[in-house]
C-alpha cells in the first residue's frame, strides 16, 4: 500500500517490496520458500502492478540447511533459486530502519526483515552465577541437573551439557526441549513417589540418564516440495528424501503436533481447500 502512494520513487518501491530473511536454517528456508510461493502464485495474479518490484532475499553466513544432507542442500538451493529467492552469503553487522549492513561493507535495503538466525543464551542466562556449557548456556549433567546445586534442573534452549559429561551441546530444537520436558516430568514423579523432593529431604532417587535420539529434520521449500532427513547426525547414513512425497510427510508430521482432533480437522480442510483453490486473500 505504501508503494502505491503517488510520487513514490522506483527505488523506494523496490525497497518497500523487498523481503529480506536472515538465517538459512529450516525456519529461514521455509519462510523464504513459502513467501516466494505466495508472491508468485497469489500476489502476482491479484497485484500485477507490483510483480516487477517485489522479491525475496535469503542471507546466510555459512551454508543454508547446514545440518541437512548435502544432496538435500543442493536441491533446496536449486529450488529456491528457481522460485525467485536470491541467496546471499554474508554476515550481518548492523540493522538500521530501511537497510542492513553486511561484513563486506555493502548495504541491503528492505521493507520487511525476518530474523531467523537461531537461539543463543539470553542476557539473563549469561548473568547467572551458574556452571556454563560451551556457548554460554546453563551447564547440566547427564541427568539435566545443574552441577553443585541440589534439586536444580535446566532444560530447553537455556541448557547445555557441561564439558565433563563428554557430550555435545544439543541443538536448540523443539524436539529436544519436548524430550527433556518428558524426561524431567518422569524423574520428578519418581522422586515424589519416593517421598523425596521436599526441603531438607535426604531421599535420593536416581533414575536413568537423559539420552537424546534425533528423530530427523524436515523443511518445506515451497511449491509443494519439502526435505526429509532422517539421519541421526551429519556423519551417519540414513534416509533422505526431497520432493512432493517429502512434502506429504512433512505436512503429516506437522498435523500430528496439532493439539486436538477438532483443530487437526480444521487445519486439514484448510490445507485441502488451499491446495485445490489457492490461498484465500483479500483484494484491497
Image: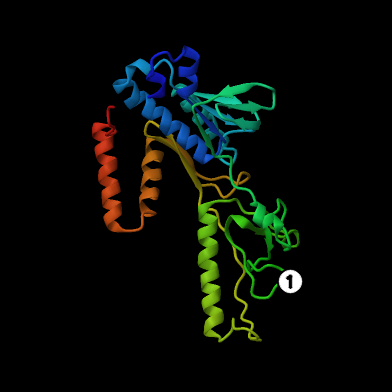
Q: Residue at x 63, y 45 (%)?
A: 235
x then y, percent, for residue 181: 52, 64
Compared with residue 1, is residue 139 higher up or lower down, i.e. above or below?
below
Q: Secondary structure at mark 1?
A: loop
Q: Which residue is mark 1?
A: 148
Q: Residue at x 59, y 55 (%)?
A: 157
x then y, percent, for residue 256: 37, 54
Image-based side of 14 in relation to 135, left or right? left
Q: Residue at x 58, y 44 (%)?
A: 118
x then y, percent, for residue 26: 51, 40
x then y, percent, for residue 220: 44, 38
Residue 137 visible within the image = no
Q: Quick one: 227 or 43, which is closer to the camera?
A: 43
**Residue 206 quadrant:** bottom right
The quadrant of the picture occupied by the N terminus is top left
Q: Residue at x 66, y 66 (%)?
A: 142
Image-based side of 255 in relation to 94, left or right? left
Amino acid at each position: 500500500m505504501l508503494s502505491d502512494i503517488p510520487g513514490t520513487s522506483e527505488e523506494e518501491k523496490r525497497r518497500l517490496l523487498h523481503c529480506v530473511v536472515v538465517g538459512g536454517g529450516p525456519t529461514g528456508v521455509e519462510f523464504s520458500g513459502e513467501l516466494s510461493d505466495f508472491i508468485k502464485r497469489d500476489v502476482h495474479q491479484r497485484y500485477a502492478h507490483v510483480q516487477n518490484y517485489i522479491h525475496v532475499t535469503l542471507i546466510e553466513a555459512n551454508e543454508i540447511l547446514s545440518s541437512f544432507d548435502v544432496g538435500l542442500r543442493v536441491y533446496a538451493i536449486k529450488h529456491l533459486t528457481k522460485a525467485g529467492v536470491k541467496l546471499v552469503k554474508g554476515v550481518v553487522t548492523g540493522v538500521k530502519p530501511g537497510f542492513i549492513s553486511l561484513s563486506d561493507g555493502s548495504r541491503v535495503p528492505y521493507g520487511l526483515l525476518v530474523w531467523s538466525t537461531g537461539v543463543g543464551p539470553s542476557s539473563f542466562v549469561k548473568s547467572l552465577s551458574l556452571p556454563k556449557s560451551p556457548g554460554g548456556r546453563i551447564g547440566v549433567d547427564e541427568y539435566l541437573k545443574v552441577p553443585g546445586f541440589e534439586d536444580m534442573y535446566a532444560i530447553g534452549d537455556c541448557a547445555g551439557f557441561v564439558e565433563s559429561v563428554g557430550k555435545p551441546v544439543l541443538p536448540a530444537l523443539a524436539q529436544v526441549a519436548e524430550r527433556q520436558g518428558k524426561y524431567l516430568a518422569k524423574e520428578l514423579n519418581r522422586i515424589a513417589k519416593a517421598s523425596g523432593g521436599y526441603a531438607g529431604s535426604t531421599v535420593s532417587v536416581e533414575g536413568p540418564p537423559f539420552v537424546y535420539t534425533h528423530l530427523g529434520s524436515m523443511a518445506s521449500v515451497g511449491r509443494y516440495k519439502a526435505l526429509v532427513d532422517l539421519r541421526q547426525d551429519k556423519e551417519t547414513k540414513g534416509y533422505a528424501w526431497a520432493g512432493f512425497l517429502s512434502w506429504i510427510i512433512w505436512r503429516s508430521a506437522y498435523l500430528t503436533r496439532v493439539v486436538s482432533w477438532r483443530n487437526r480437522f480444521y487445519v486439514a480442510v484448510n490445507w485441502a481447500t488451499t491446495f485445490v483453490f489457492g490461498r484465500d486473500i483479500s483484494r484491497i
